[in-house]
Amino acid sequence: KLKFKTYINKQKGTQELVKRLFDNSKKYDKSSTVGTKNQTPNKSKHVPLPPTDLPSSS
């Protein structure tokens, strides 16, 4: 039972750290800049593939 409580407390602590680092949480009143630098260039590189289920016009 003690190990289970310790595990739950570790999970809560991990969730709190993740909120601090990544979430735009009201509790910390700041938006995170940790992941934003890496995510922005990836969005501009994305090119949608043409749908293959449409019949060709040839």
Image (tube, rainbow, N blue to C red):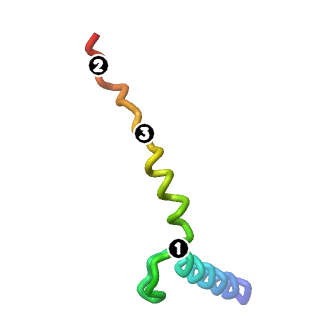
Frontmost residue, 42 versus 6: 42
Vertical relation: 51 (above or below) 29 = above
Residue at 41% over, 33% down:
49
Q: Residue furthest left?
A: 57
Residue 22 tag number: 1
Disc 1 marks a residue whose amino acid type is Phe
Q: Which SS class for mark 2?
A: loop
Asked if disc 3 and disc 2 are in contact, CB closer than 8 Å, the reply is no
Q: Which SS class for mark 3?
A: loop
Does label 3 or label 2 sit earlier along the sequence?
3
Q: Is residue 3 left or right of residue 27?
A: right
Residue 55 tag number: 2
Does label 1 or label 3 sit earlier along the sequence?
1
Report how far apart the C-alphas of labels 3 and 2 lie in the structure.
21 Å
Q: On the image, numbered disc 3 is attached to which residue? A: 47
Report how far apart the C-alphas of labels 2 and 1 lie in the structure.
44 Å
Residue at 52% over, 72% down:
33
Vertical relation: 48 (above or below) 25 = above
Vertical relation: 36 (above or below) 27 = above
Q: Which SS class for mark 1?
A: helix
Q: Is residue 35 left or right of residue 55?
A: right
Mark 3 neighbour class, 10 Å CA radius: few under 14, some 14 to 19, many 20 or more: few
Disc 2 marks a residue whose amino acid type is Pro
Mark 2 neighbour class, 10 Å CA radius: few under 14, some 14 to 19, many 20 or more: few
Frontmost residue, 17 versus 48: 48
